[in-house]
Amino acid sequence: MPTPEQDAQSAYDALPNEAREAMGGCLKALPSAEELPHMLSLARLLWHQGWMNTPSRHPYLLLRLYHSVAFLRYEGNKFWDSFAEAVGEANFPTNRQSEVNHAFALIAEYCGLPLLVGSHRLYVQSAVRHIGIPVRVWRGFISVCERLLFASDEYKRWNDDEWESGISMWVGGRKNLRDFFVKNRETATKWVEEMLDARRVLDAHPQWTLSDIKQMSLLRAEYFEAVPETALFLRPDDPESLFRDRPRLRFREQDGIVSITLEAPRIAKESDLPALWRVGEKCAKASTNPVALAVDGDAFVSALTLHLLRGNEDKKFPPLRGLMPWALWSDTLGSFVSPVARGLPVGFYTIISRHKLAFTTRDGWLNDDDDEIRWNQEFQLRDGSNCFISRLQPEGRRATLGVEGWHQITFAPRERLELRLFPSPTDRFQMDVSRSGVVRLPRWPWFLIKMPKGMLASSGEETAALLNKEFRLYTVDRRINGKWLECDETSGLEDDQLFHFKVAADACYPPPRSEPARPAVKLGGFNQLHVAMVAVAKQDNALPFSVQLRSERHGVIPFGNAAEVQLGVTETLKQSHLDKLQVRFRDYLPWFLLTATQHHASWEELLIAYEMMNVSNVQARLNQWAFLVIERTGMMKRRGQCWTDFENRLHVGSHDSGSFTVRYSGLTNQIYSILAQIEPSTPIKAVWERGRPPHLEIKFPLKGAVDQRLRQLCLEKRIRIMNHSLWTH
């Protein structure tokens, strides 16, 4: 068996010459994610057996250790704190740093690895260049990939100044990440192209996993473990499907009983059966479908190893992280995320531990209340053993979590510049969103730009001036006249700035179309001209038009996860009819917000919608509990980061004195399209009963077969008609 030094030498000797010169060329010389902890433990053992006195005794192992620390733990100027931790030292004084740097430089030069030089040799920066992108700055790299996903190949034509300007805007004050993109543009562009190609390939092949793409050599497991957004970028709709050929731990809690299972992957070929899965003492027959092995209390170990037994063959899968000392389950992602991560997306999480945990900080999460105990609640596992559950339910857009003996984790939204739109307060109930994503409103919506504070300029006034100079809204090839203004009230967005676009009063809605002239229509007489003109106008209004935000220096600014938004015009109603369709925002709050964000209803998007739509004198309080109630009622599901699969319900009451009352709970756009055709007899009102989603009460007259017509329209709009009540069929 080779020694750690021999193993390291073989890895570096295998690097081709072109890789030694390239940024990130040494990444393949590092041990795999499964082998890396073992290598670090052996290095620590050798260090304390005398290696510390002569760092050059194991030169290749030192090179590998230096690179591993740079890859896993490099962050700003804390490299030597991380190096000391890796070798089991309390601190690492300057003279020891010089000894290690000298030995590192000798072996790096011998291997043909370039060393950066400023006013002096830059050892740590050289190591970072050798391995590419450290884990702790990978999140920023993914955010740039997300941005360039919408730029097509336009960014390849930018000159160096345009490239530097764009990168500076996207990565903010993260100097290490900025230097990677600006000083190594060719290499950075190659890495970005690899990621974009992987995204496109996976989009085209929804059944593929990570193992099926050639870019896997770049996508080390540590990136996925520390930055869950990596999987979200590659497959936004179903990130977990990327790992369906690998064992995964699953968590479930139902009726007060917790179950922990190890999901073994499916066997691709029936000819490889029969076979047996084994983990610890638990066994199950392998199948062409995934197989769940109940591990429950046995999961509270540092690592679990899955075996596939076939005849005399024993195939071992790489060790899977166990639940010790505690584990973090992402309800939004549907998977465990590594607690080694220092930054995670804001969302819903569950902590599972064998024993009660002591929390040093839990800012930004809901505390225990009369409705629910959320922290350190004792549960029974399916095998009869006990565990403790803490539910992390966010109050806002940012939160922190500190567990005693562990580093603090920050939960925050992605830092990027994006475009949103919301209806004006008077148009909330009239907004219609089609399945294809077309947003129909009676007039121009409120356009909104969200960005981290200081991204474009140091003050709100300077940022607004820059937006008005460089960021313009277009409908195809026609610019929309208006002005960017800073939003005054953004109480829940402490680290972000919001700017809305005030469309000029003379801007037509919908805008004139620059389409070829229509063919001539033969009229039977002059009296048909007006009818024909009205028909053409209605046809024009029915056609959607696209809106896009562009910047000369930064290209297309995404609208959520799309490059543009499709708008259309709703049919105009009489004012007396509209007056009956006014519902106070706070009385129907969760459904208003879900309607505005229904194609990407993440917690972050709901919070932004709340900031833009909650503009009345009586402020409505946003509480995520209202959305959990809707989910638990079975009226929507959570997939990944978002709520989706909305169910709209309607219950028809009994007839009474020439009228009948309908109760409706669901998205406003679904019921509005019906109420626009059938006018209620009185103004509708919202009712919010404790423990239930809010609903609308709508009274209709009993005339002209309104009842039958209402039911028919509900079928067309796929509104579920309930028999007994809104909550029971």
Image (cartoon, rainbow, N blue to C red):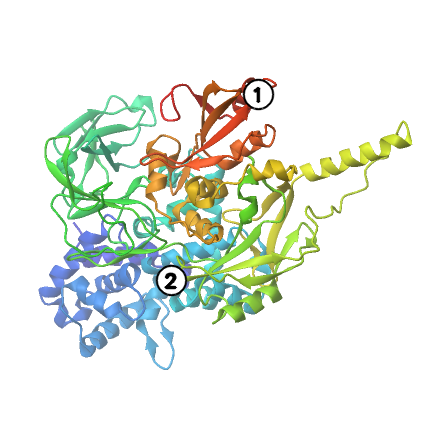
> Where does label 2 land, which residue?
20
Which label lies toward us, 2 or 1?
1
* Residue 353 percent location from the top left of the image: 16, 44
> Callout 1, which amino acid?
Val
> Callout 2, which amino acid?
Arg
Residue 161 sits in quarter: bottom right
Visible in this render: residue 207?
yes
Relative horizontal placement of residue 455, taking residue 431 as reference (left or right)? left
| Depth check, front residue: 381 or 96 | 381
| Depth check, front residue: 465 or 75 | 465
> Where does label 1 land, which residue?
706
* Residue 568 percent location from the top left of the image: 63, 41
Q: Is residue 320 above or below residue 278?
A: below
Q: Sequence-wise, which precedes: disc 2 or disc 1?
A: 2
Relative horizontal placement of residue 236, taking residue 679 as reference (left or right)? left
| Depth check, front residue: 68 or 170 | 170
Q: Is residue 355 above or below residue 341?
A: above
- The local crowd at label 2, few if under 14, some if 14 to 19, many if 20 or more residues have their Cα within 10 Å, is some
How many angstroms separate mark 2 from mark 1 (CA)? 77 Å
Visible in this render: residue 423?
no
Residue extending furthest bottom?
A: 119
* Residue 279 percent location from the top left of the image: 17, 33
Residue 132 sits in quarter: bottom left
